[in-house]
Amino acid sequence: MARAKKRSPPAAVHNRFMDESRWKAVDEYVDGLLVQEDDALHAAVRASEAAGLPPIAVSPAHGKLLYLLARAQKAARILEIGTLGGYSTIWLARGLAPNGRVTTLELDPKHAEVARSNLERAGVSDHVDIHIGRAIETLSTLAPQPPFDFVFIDADKPSTPAYFEWALRLSRPGTLILVDNVVRRGALADADTDDESARAMQRLNELVAAESRVSATLIQTVGVKGYDGFMIALVG
Ligand code: SAH
Ligand code: DHB
Ligand code: MG
């Protein structure tokens, strides 16, 4: 049961470069210079917090990455699984091609309501469709044509492999699929982990490795949201 793998790293590993306060300081440095969230993004974070939503939206730098990838894709159709308060949705919607749409799936009606108001304030609500319900059920109601150009998977972690398979069905050659929270403080590499989310991410990696239709990589990240990482997969 309790195994040696649970022990803490040796004290020497805790040098100043491994310190979470450093990760935060660098994120804040980058946010100040490159990301530059505007009032609508700040307000979305504040309103989500005030409504009691968990503070698990993507970081500002990660949000900007979503925006840049959407733009690079010239994405007219974006699928997001897991809306929360719509912070990532705002970034995605801002990266849309003219007349594009974001379809975002959320289980919790309260989260969806907060998102609606945040999207409205950001001026993107005309380009976003929020579907309330279990994503796995909503996905089966979405028309596979036209396919999505970009998919962001960020909902209940144990369902991630199933969401990835749905994303593939709703994709075309050239679609990008980004999956959040794949590293889970390193639990991804722990073959004995009993964290259900980490096990799901291991299944995801195995599924993707065996899937000839996608080419993928995974980037570990540190920052204001701690130690995690994302997978990015290109279809076709
Ligand atoms: N993408 C958001 C964060 C999403 S947090 C951002 O970065 O701003 C994960 C969200 O997934 C939560 O709002 C949670 O309610 C939702 N969720 C959990 N289980 C779900 C399910 N089965 N179907 C759809 N959404 C789900
Ligand atoms: C959790 C979910 C997320 O999407 C995230 O980015 C961080 C944490 C969570 O459920 O704990
Ligand atoms: Mg996430």
Image (cartoon, helix red, strand yellow):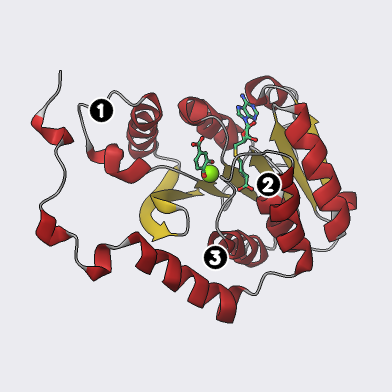
Say if 193 sits above or below 55 in the image.
above
Res. 94 visible in picture: yes
Q: Is residue 200 left or right of residue 90?
A: left
Q: Which residue is mark 3?
A: 61
- Helix, strand or loop at label 3? It is helix
Q: Is residue 184 left or right of residue 191?
A: right
Q: Which residue is mark 1?
A: 193
Q: Quadrant of the N terminus?
A: top left
Task: Give neighbour class at mark 3: few <14, some 14-19, many 20+ (Cα, 10 Å).
Answer: some
Alpha-carbon span between mark 2 and mark 3: 19 Å
Q: Position of residue 185 (x, y in %)?
A: 33, 44
| Among the two numbered marks 1 and 3 on one chain, the one whose residue lies closer to the N terminus | 3
Say if 63 sits above or below 2 in the image.
below
Say if 76 sits above or below 202 in the image.
below
- Helix, strand or loop at label 2? It is helix
Q: Amino acid at mark 2?
A: Glu
